[in-house]
Image (spheres, grey):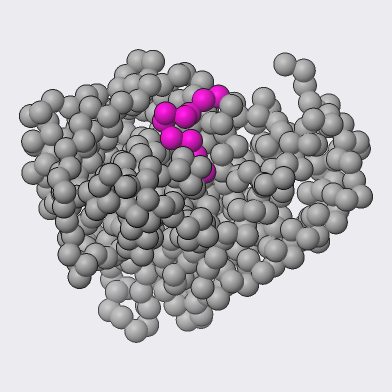
Amino acid sequence: MEPHAQTEIARRDPATVMRLSRLGSLHQCRLSFMRQLTRRMADENWSFSRPAFEIDDKGVGHAVYTAQGPDRAYSLVAFAHDLPADQRSDRVIAEAWDATFALFDGIPTPEDIDRLSQNVPLQEAGRVSETELSLSRANRSVRLWTHVVDRLAAGQQPDLEQIYQVGYLMRTTAVYGSGKFGAADREKTADRDEVSGPFQIEMLSVYLTRVFVRDLVQYMAQVKGGDQTSALDPEIARWLGIGNSTGLGMAPFIVNHPVLFNNWIMAREEAISRVRSVETAAEKDARVFRDVFARSKQSIAWWHSEHPIQVEKLAALKDDLNSIGAFLATDDLTQDHPWDRIIRWSETALSEEGQELLASLILEPYGDVVDGLSSCMADTNAAAQVIDGTVPVSGVRALIRNSFDWALDLDWNDPENCTRAWYVSEEKLEPRLGERFEEPIADYEQPLAPARDAALAFKALQEWPDDAPIAEFLLRHPEHRHTVRRAQISRVAPYGEIHDNTIGANVMPIDMLRAKLSFFGATHFDPRSDRWVRICMYAGAPYPDELNTANADLWVYPEVAQ
């Protein structure tokens, strides 16, 4: 491969990248987990089948969808239910759903399906085994579901505008993996090439769920309309993704997994650095960028939210699109480090939402430079969790200052800086964020305030001699072990720490949710409060029967009518 770059533009500083407002403005990119999966399935020529679809006229029953890769098969076992309207809820504490799913490791036998039928519909109240890799559930978007069924049953196609505005017929309220409720631990599949990357099991489950939802809505229309029923136009079906409602349960993940989150951010920052380092760009690469920019404008036109913060960000983003368009009108993007120039221009000309959209878009022409970084995004460094007790106190102080210099001078006794407290609910064992001075939760606080804890540890370390081994300090102060561990982890994970206060009065948990979901490849973030968000997954993606190497990647950007 001919190198694209001769000089290297450094990766952006973690102090810039790891602010919550910026993390809450990230967009999907070539390294997003959904796109990694569709590229792989197309490159490896996976085959797909539907060995069972046993659904009755009330929409109750089960179906099986099998994905066969080069070495192994994975099967989604889906159960459809007749859910009364008063039981339909996006809350994680719901007890019934329109559909429930398990991703089975291999091809299930009738006995497996019978066992799953007694457990999967119960979700938390049931139990699965290590032959199941994920457990999930979904509810209908009732208005759009009814519209699509009625239109198809009447021999018509659904209204495209409604498809674009909602984007999905069902939304998941949880996709559990990695050992929850008896499912297989991550270690069982971590050494399998096809699912070794982060969340590939969950992304495969959602990809197959989307096929089931398409087939089920077509079947229910057929039940209602009989012979006059229309087949759903594949072009319309392609813009039906899978929705997702995500709440606070996801937010602590990026705090609790600093090495993993670092690997995601660092891979993206390295990709941005490599592309910015391109000295001269080929005209074909400039054309690819202009094309995906035009297509992204269409996607953003479909992006709606009623949350005041996102409404404001979307308004700024639409202004940013106009500014980018004006920049492109006067620049051919081929000479004099074009991608570095446009990124440097964006830093003062655009909002953070626009800056991060642009940072994702410049990667699109350079799959040969960027895509290999996906192999670096899993966490395989178990040794990073082991505290090295021989490091001197001075070394740990320096590491803490490097990651948390902004936090060391904050007044942590000021209620504004410690208004919130993270805890785990007794009922659902799910993370919650409460008001420290209004609720009796302080005694149950989870260690999800690394900045405050770093400041406390740093203060305690000030009283120790520089050359004392940190092990001696920890023998006296074991309460600071997690901070010392995180400080040492920062040596291999410079992007592992959020550079903001996660318990302050102004913290926006949705910023943490969006950061994680952007790496999934989610689009159309629609916060419903500061604590939960709806998104869309796989909208625009080819279904298994149409997946090929030509359409496996840029599907996230809608084609613009000429």
In reply to whether residue 544 is colored magenta, the answer given is yes
Give x and y (percent) for residue 118. 8, 44
- Split into 4 quadrants, where in the image is the C terminus? top right
Please tell me which residue is depicted at 55% across the width and 76% down the height of the picture.
308
Task: Specify the segment rendered in magenta.
Answer: 539-549
Q: Is residue 140 visible?
A: yes
In reply to whether residue 295 is colored magenta, the answer given is no
Question: Closer to the camera, 16 or 413?
Answer: 16
Residue that lies at the very extreme toward the front in this rendered image:
228
Q: How many marks?
A: 0
- State which quadrant residue 144 falls in: bottom left
Question: Closer to the camera, 475 or 426?
Answer: 426
Horizontal placement of 18 versus 324: left or right?
Answer: left
Residue that lies at the very extreme toward the bottom in this rendered image:
438
Question: Closer to the camera, 525 or 325?
Answer: 325
Give x and y (percent) for residue 540. 52, 43
Please tell me which residue is depicted at 84% across the width and 31% down the height of the picture.
283
Give x and y (percent) for residue 14. 64, 50
Please tell me which residue is depicted at 33% across the width and 58% down the height of the picture.
150
- Split into 4 quadrants, where in the image is the N terminus? top right
- State which quadrant residue 324 falls in: bottom right
Give x and y (percent) for residue 519. 52, 45
Horizontal placement of 329 versus 3: left or right?
Answer: right
Vertical position of residue 532 compared to residue 554: above or below: below
Q: Is residue 476 visible?
A: no
Vertical position of residue 94 compared to residue 75: above or below: below
Q: Name the dominant secondary structure of the magenta segment.
A: loop
